[in-house]
Amino acid sequence: MTSVLREHFEEAVRNFQFEGALQNAAPYGNGHINDTYLLTFANGSGSTKIILQRMNRQVFAKPVELMENIMGVTSHLRKKIMEQGGDPLRETLNVIPSRGQRPYFMDSAGEYWRAYRFITGAVSLDRVERPEDFYESALAFGNFQRMLADYPAGTLHETIPGFHDTEARFDAFQKAVERDICGRARYVRKEIEFIRARRELAGVFNRLLEKKELPLRVTHNDTKLNNVMIDSRTRRGICVIDLDTVMPGLAMNDFGDSIRFGASTAAEDETDLRKVSCDMALYEQYVKGFLKGCAGQLTQKEVRLLPMGARIMTFECGIRFLTDYLEGDRYFKIHRENHNLDRCRTQLRLVESMEEQWDLMNKIIEKYQ
Ligand code: ADP
Ligand code: GN1
Ligand code: MG
């Protein structure tokens, strides 16, 4: 931590309603967007863990609106969880207010911080360890969507406009290639061609939306496996986290984003592309869990389009990583040179793998429809 960041970090710690003496603080997790810290406070004979996050201001221009979304959504979920006899302290995020009674704290540099109770006795996985874990994550994301089906969608702020507008992502990519501000386009001709050859894929959902053939639902929009907490003892998917992008969206995209990350045979940043493919057994687990979690709410058309969601979300993510590489790595956190390029390559390889297995992906859906 730089000394300036430390100063603001300490300012933030002082300004939330935490109890006890700070024992330990360390960066935490593998998110690509926010700065996340795990804090441990000693109180009485025990200790309390807290997640403190500095929200990414480059990505989220309106953190106050964002926290308004999170307060609304978590209150709604809390009510449902209690009605079902669940544990609201473990099954949804719990925001800890600032000393000024707000769900965030703005430090003297104008950066926004927020704090959550740490969900104990649970893990967030960066890779599927057992197929059942992936099934559980699918159930959790499906349930999440179902529990928010009656949420007043019109009250949600759009925290990132056009977040999954794949066509707009495609256009931004084309611009980035044209401008080529870092002179990197010459290294990625093959990837550029791969994306350009699939231009039509980017517009598939927009065409259907224009024809009013798809419903907008309250969706999570960032359904990576590490955005769901799995109970360490029961191995149940207990809590969906990372609610920054909860907005009206498409069910297929929530399904698809999970597949691109969790059904891959390799890590998102694997450099040996021979190791990367879309695992059909994992895909099937997810189909099963997600449909069960959504409990019959999806239309036939949506169910039929789930494989398309996987292909499009993977394609879009590849486009986003390559765009960021071309623009000088300004959006996603990187930990090594060419990190975004490596990530882009796995996504494009996965798109290819899905294309190779396209019939099977659709057959599996038919089996559960
Ligand atoms: P990002 O937007 O950067 O991905 P997340 O909100 O997903 O940030 O947080 C990063 C990681 O921190 C998560 O993947 C998870 O491992 C952990 N985490 C976040 N919130 C909690 C929580 N309330 N309890 C336990 N772990 C959490
Ligand atoms: C980001 O925040 P995180 O790491 O859960 C990104 C997703 C991408 C993902 C790729 C707000 O997710 O859209 O699919 O990285 N989140 C945002 O790993 O852009
Ligand atoms: Mg996350």
Image (cartoon, rainbow, N blue to C red):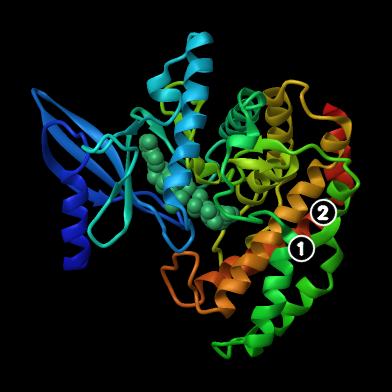
User: How far apart, in angstroms, are the residues tagged by discs 1 and 2?
Assistant: 8 Å
Name the mark on residue 175: none
Q: Position of residue 184 (x, y in %)?
A: 59, 87
Report the quarter where the C terminus lies: top right
Report whether residue 273 is seen: no
Q: Is residue 96 left or right of residue 350?
A: left
Residue 12 seen: yes
Vertical placement of residue 264 versus 178, above or below: above
Q: Residue at x 29, y 34 (%)?
A: 97
Number of other residues with Cα within 10 Å of mark 1, as a class: few under 14, some 14 to 19, many 20 or more: some
Quarter assignment of residue 188: bottom right
Q: Which residue does the image show at 52% across and 40% down from the upper left?
A: 129
Please tell me whether residue 272 is drawn above or below residue 139 in the rendered image: below
Q: Which mark is residue 167?
A: 1
Q: Residues within 10 Å of mark 2 (few under 14, many from 20)?
A: some
Mark 2: which secondary structure?
helix
Q: Name the element at disc 1.
A: helix
Sequence-first disc among 1 and 2: 1
- Residue 237 image offset from top left, x and y in percent: 52, 28
Q: Residue at x 47, y 20 (%)?
A: 78
* Quarter occupied by the N terminus: bottom left
200 left or right of 339?
right
Q: Looking at the picture, which amino acid does disc 2 mark?
A: Asn
Q: To which residue does mark 2 refer?
A: 206
Amino acid type of the residue tagged 1 in the rendering:
Glu
Q: Nearer the viewer, residue 226 or 263?
A: 226
Q: Is residue 205 left or right of residue 343?
A: right
In front of the other: 25 or 126 = 25
Left or right, 210 with respect to 236, comes to right
